[in-house]
Image (cartoon, helix red, strand yellow):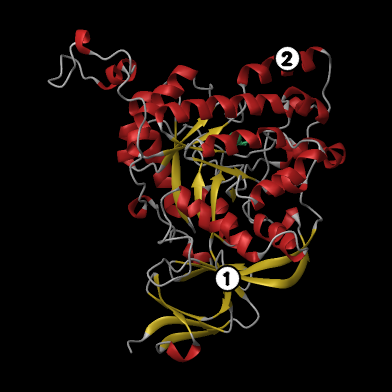
Amino acid sequence: MKEVDLVIRGAQVVSPDRIVPAAVAVAGEQIVAVGHDDTMPPAREELRADGLYLLPGAIDSHVHFRDPGYPHKETWKTGSAAAALGGVTTVFEMPNTHPATGTIEALRIKQKAAEASYVDFGIHGLLGDDTIDRLEELLEGGVTSFKAFVGNTFGNLPAPTDGALLEGFETLAPLGIRTVVHAENSSILQRRQKQMQAAGRIDAMAHLAARPAVAEIEAIGRVLTLAEWTGARVHIAHHSAADSLYLLREARARGVDVTAETCPQYLLLNTDHMRTLGGVMRLNPPIREPRHNQPLWDALMDGTLDMIATDHAPHAPEEKTRPNIWECDCGFPGVETQMPLMLTEVNRGRASLMDYVRWSSVNPAKAWGLYGTKGVIAPGAHADIAFVDMSRTGVLSQNKLQSISKISPWNGRAVQGYPVHTLLRGRFVMREGRLVQDMAGWGRSVKSVQRMPTAKPRNTEHYSSAILRTPPGVPETATPVGEIDWSRA
Ligand code: NCD
Ligand code: ZN
């Protein structure tokens, strides 16, 4: 047998339906064998991993690395280092940088910055009124997917009009490309915030009062209506409210290709924590009342919510701790703490490791067209592996975060279960809990391995959407107006 680069022995390999003791052989960037010890080829390096679990590396669909634009908050190098430390091997990075990722020039700047990445990545391009004519160009330029900030948030990107959202979905539906939506109703948020401010409210609870769950319910409903009409694939970011889960269930039952994430903060934190943590916990959508926590767990368990993302949204400590809540930036870091937090819940018996890998890796890999290459420990897949020690205990400390943003609501939280090594395409980017410094730049775009099957667009025979794609002049295939079957329109 040909010598391979690495054989890992003594660990248990985790997939969504089983946990099996198995050895894993890695040659170059790929897994080449998973099986009994005796069947392994000779290797340059043999690694004992007794007592550890091998999980497919986590795929975080929602991170903000702030680069270009806000290097005092985060950079690609520091954000991706945090990911590697957290057992995360692939991230999808958000477009609310400066410049926002809505032009080819801005995309090129981001791609240059991402050359420093420790982990693999996708780039979400911006879907807004001003970018609607450039979606195909951005896709050709390398974005993997799009993001629509339907609710206002950090970066103050204007929410797309409903008309632009519909047109964007009409363009993307036949291409099979999925759009992430920050689903909150901008007009509700803006009016409520003004009212709170006029009433002199500057406390943390006023942020929640300004962003009631109905803003999320309404926006998710609207987005799903447009997705169903067009056949576009959509992804609901940071699902925070119990009350909007039924919309996901109903839309799926009608055949809408919607995926949805929630984040550890919506599962494990609530207004009780906000009273003491204040602005540190300010984020969008807001962390809500305790009654939302358990239904979100239940929705992960029953598959209504597909995955855990982090919305890693780093800011400087001084930007998070101002006395006036409206002056505290929204968001906090998370890519590094997600795995220990969730593994702690697994240790508490709230879910199994098999459930966890479905949420952390398998389902995001499927949503973004990477499954088979990523999201699985099997021959032919990328050797992206989080080595997990379920018995290791510790206390999360914001000062020890790899992220530049050393402020976190998880500071001081006791956890059990840590990633101890992170392998990305056959190379360690984190080993024994330490970053492998010279692996900066090993990360690369997943665009070349992404396979999004073409979706079946709907309602494209409708005259109003057909005309959008009609180039100037009368195309040969145009139906004379008199012959259009209006009964189908
Ligand atoms: C995010 C950020 O800071 O970029 N903030 C947040 O509160 N979630 C933006 C976002 O994801 O909405
Ligand atoms: Zn958002």
Residue farthest toward the front in the current orientation of the protein:
487
Seen at 57% across and 77% down, the residue is 20
- Residue 40 screen position, x and y as percent: 43, 87
Seen at 33% across and 42% down, the residue is 454
Going by the numbered disc 1, the residue's amino acid type is: Arg
Quick check: which quadrant has ligand 1?
A: top right
- Residue 364 screen position, x and y as percent: 51, 51
* Foreground residue among 50 and 101: 50
Residue farthest toward the left in the current orientation of the protein:
476
* Foreground residue among 236 and 125: 236
| Mark 1 surroundings within 10 Å by alpha-carbon count, few (fewer than 14), some (14 through 19), many (20 or more) | few
Q: Are marks 1 and 2 in contact (CB under 8 Å)?
A: no
Q: Earlier in the sequence, mark 1 or mark 2?
A: 1
Going by the numbered disc 2, the residue's amino acid type is: Lys
Residue farthest toward the bottom in the current orientation of the protein:
38
Viewer-side label of 1, 2: 1
According to the image, label 1 marks what residue?
Answer: 18
- Residue 406 screen position, x and y as percent: 71, 49
Seen at 40% across and 40% down, the residue is 109
Instruction: Identify the element where label 2 is drawn.
Output: helix
Instruction: Identify the element where label 1 is drawn.
Output: loop
Location of the C terminus by quadrant is top left
- Residue 451 screen position, x and y as percent: 35, 50
| Mark 2 surroundings within 10 Å by alpha-carbon count, few (fewer than 14), some (14 through 19), many (20 or more) | few
The image's mark for residue 194 is 2
| Ligand 1 within 8 Å, label 1 CB | no
Whole-number angstrom distance, CA of label 1 to CA of label 2: 52 Å
Location of the N terminus by quadrant is bottom left
| Numbered-mark total | 2
* Foreground residue among 202 and 75: 202
Horizontal side of residue 61 vs 287, given as left or right:
left
Q: Is 420 located above or below residue 89 in the figure?
A: below
